[in-house]
Amino acid sequence: MIRRVLNISGKVLLALGVLVLLFAAYQLWGTGLAESHSQATLRTQLDKQLPAGATARSQRIADHAGQQHGKVPPKTTTATATVAPTTPTPAIGQPIGTIQIPNIGVDQVVVQGVGTSDLQKGPGHYPGTPLPGQMGNASVAGHRTTYGHPFFDLNEVTPGQKIVITTAQGIFTYTATAQTVVSPTDVAVIDATTTPQLTLTTCNPRYSASQRLVVKAALTSSVLFGPGGPSATTTTTAPATGNQLAGTGTAPTGLAGEQATGSVGRWVEVVLLGLATVAVGVLVWLVARRVRHRWAVYVPGAVAVLVVLFFFFTVLSPLLPASY
């Protein structure tokens, strides 16, 4: 009896170990599949909002910014380029533009919102901050190791490097001015400013949500879109002020990166999918015991289990206490 109990316990622990490894693989690579699909959908939506030639123009600007990296020293002053007028805030989950960071290979669609479901689609714009290109501190958060990890190498964005954001209002080039690490509750980094700036935030260190890596940048040039499409680039320079203003409206309690507990309905869905995974696995095992060539059952059965397990992980992942 003892030997049988130990044998069963060993198999259960082995299965749990495999499950943990599969979940880790899903977090690192599987989440990227969902994010890639969301990005394709968002880009299709955004293309309908941009004027003809906007995407090609922004790509040329980003390519030029990448070629110039390292050839000129970082500027010690910020710039006040022509800013875009204030517009109504897009609905949560809708695309607001693209962000390109040439030196780390980022080219992603930015979605409105920094909630769990928003950041699973790509970098998210903090509600309550101005849109990129407008006056003030436009702020964007992004995952570092999961869901496509758009900000995986954000630590390599140092002062002097360029960030190009394209929205329905124009193409806006920001120059990085500073990089810092703060606590998840330090919302002062997204406070309002008296100059057009950009703040990027992500979890730090990699594979942890204990801190936030923050990159600050100043708007240095802009290409505003008019009725006829892109206009000429305007760039003017001015000394930096760096003044922080208190935010208005409801203040956030923390920077993006923490995930809230899901509703009872979501947990019920997790339990049902978990039971479905176990049921499929047991069914495959029972059928395999009754046939001579078990591999003919185990191979397709393993595929079926992995498919159900993928959906189980998809529902479970957003309910975990932190997202990286």
Image (spheres, helix red, strand yellow):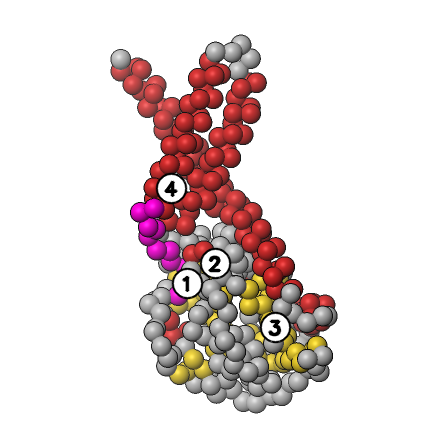
Whether pointer 1 and pointer 3 mark residues with C-beta atoms closer than 8 Å, the reply is no
Earlier sequence position, callout 4 versus callout 3: 3
Q: Is residue 223 visible?
A: no
Whether pointer 1 and pointer 4 mark residues with C-beta atoms closer than 8 Å, the reply is no
Residue 2, horizontal then vertical, whole percent: 26, 15
Q: Which residue is disc 4 drawn over?
A: 269
Whether pointer 2 and pointer 1 mark residues with C-beta atoms closer than 8 Å, the reply is yes
Earlier sequence position, callout 2 versus callout 4: 2
Report the disc number at residue 256.
1
Q: What residue occupies the far left of the structure in this picture? A: 1
Q: Secondary structure at mark 2?
A: helix
Q: Which residue is disc 3 drawn over?
A: 168
Amino acid on which the number 1 mark rests in the picture: Ala
Residue 71, horizontal then vertical, whole percent: 69, 74
Amino acid on which the number 4 mark rests in the picture: Glu
| Residue toward you, 308 or 178 | 308
Residue 33, horizontal then vertical, whole percent: 56, 47
